Image (cartoon, coloured by chain):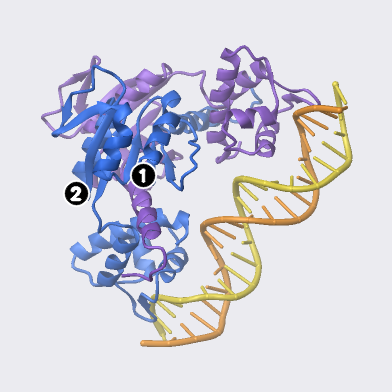
Chain colours: A blue, B purple, C orange, D yellow
Amino acid sequence: MIDPAIPRLYAYHRALREAQAAGKSTITSDGLAALLGDAIAPSQIRKDLSALGPLGRRGRGYAINPLVEQLAWVLGLEHDWRIAIVGFGYLGHAFATFITAREARFRIAAIFDRSPSVIGQHWEGVPVRDVAEIDTVVRELGCNIGVIAVPAAAAQSSAQRLAGAGVRAILNFAPTSLRLREPVIVRNIDLAGEMSILTSWLTSSETPREARA
Amino acid sequence: MIDPAIPRLYAYHRALREAQAAGKSTITSDGLAALLGDAIAPSQIRKDLSALGPLGRRGRGYAINPLVEQLAWVLGLEHDWRIAIVGFGYLGHAFATFITAREARFRIAAIFDRSPSVIGQHWEGVPVRDVAEIDTVVRELGCNIGVIAVPAAAAQSSAQRLAGAGVRAILNFAPTSLRLREPVIVRNIDLAGEMSILTSWLTSSETPREARA
DNA sequence: AAATGTGAAGAGGTTCACAGCG
DNA sequence: CGCTGTGAACCTCTTCACATTT
């Protein structure tokens, strides 16, 4: 399955779970698009779903139950995952709380930080360890996913340690593009960058037609 | 300037500030690409920068100082911005701390929540108010940017209140596509969705060639 | 000689339109 | 007749290649 479709599949899954809860058992691509606030075209939905197999019935629509199951499988929603967080400042802490509260399939298995004042503390029973222990602990606990919530300067070395310890998926909050030899999927979330997109838009729309300052 | 270039411009700005701090006064598109870890092609950099005006000199490269100034202007880095946060759970709290610590140009001007146990608390001197007050308070304080950190079900109404109060840029952490009549730029950050991209990739790469379950 | 600026080619993903099936 | 499944057109952004300028 192609990359850019995955976020959409996740959205489909969420919407279909709601339809399921509302007692519906079947849905059309038009109906699903409406459920998603018309943010996605029905033809896009059909193309995405057809790539998963012959899930629809022409003239009828899609049966919701098998669709939800198939999506859950493709998205890896059925497995449990062990997460290693590197950097336990506000961001790392908030992420841990948020993701465990939101989805039971995620478990914070290990937490690392560089600061001696944070090392030794506990969060939900998980000790904060020194980043030097990443290699042994991550490997020992079999963490699948790494979360990088350290300053930009420390991100690359954190990523290398995680990848070296066997982690194959990384969520990176640092504003740096990580270079890794291993086959690792990296998703970047740059909060300050997102804010800049907003301020850029506000600036250019506030000064409608006036060449630069 | 076109949308997808903005995050790159922001990355250029950051890299150029570092080059500036390192005492360099000029740089080529190849040099800047190297600074960015070769994540962006030199030709892409030239195309992006040429859209801002005649900033380079053929045979020489770019003078860093005017480049940084021009980028700062385009990105709206020179203004100060007043942020209204709706939803002050872990995510809203972490965002407030993170963004104010990271960039001085952002100020948390107002905080709203629905829960009576949170309303009335203070964060850095800013009171947490009832979401019903969004319209009057946001307008009165002249907030430019809204941040939505509430559950999906409450996101749409929060967005409408913010937009109605004059906010023209929203950072949305809820997994919903917001529908607004007003001309508002919305950036979505879906943490659970990003995690699903990772787990989807892990699942499909763990089971190399085996058709669905 | 060196590196920018840019038209043209290319790649990737989305939308269209309709054939095909129930 | 209704709705899926899909090849083709379309669109947008990226990469290439080279003419241009200092």
- Residue pointed to by mark 1: A166
- Tag shown at residue A104: 2
Q: Chain of mark 1?
A: A
Mark found first going from the N terminus, 2 or 1: 2
Q: Give coordinates of residue A17: x percent, y percent.
A: 24, 61
Residue type, mark 2 in image: Ala
Secondary structure at numbered mark 1:
loop
> Who is closer to the viewer here, A70 or D2?
A70
Q: Give coordinates of residue A71: x percent, y percent.
A: 32, 63
Q: Residues within 10 Å of mark 1 (few under 14, many from 20)?
A: some
- Tag shown at residue B194: none
2 and 1 marks in contact (CB < 8 Å): no
> Who is closer to the viewer here, A82 or B32?
A82
Q: Residue at left 18%, top 68%?
A: A23
Q: Residue at left 40%, top 40%?
A: A163
Q: Residue at left 81%, top 26%?
A: B59
> Who is closer to the viewer here, B139 or B196?
B196
Residue type, mark 1 in image: Gly
Q: Give coordinates of residue A199: x percent, y percent.
A: 48, 28
Q: Residue at left 46%, top 40%?
A: B183
- A39 on left or right of A123: right
Q: CA distance from mark 2 to mark 1?
A: 23 Å
Q: Say above or below: A53 vs B144.
A: below
Query: Split into 4 quadrants, where in the image is the N terminus of chain B?
Result: top right
Q: Are marks 2 and 1 on the same chain?
A: yes
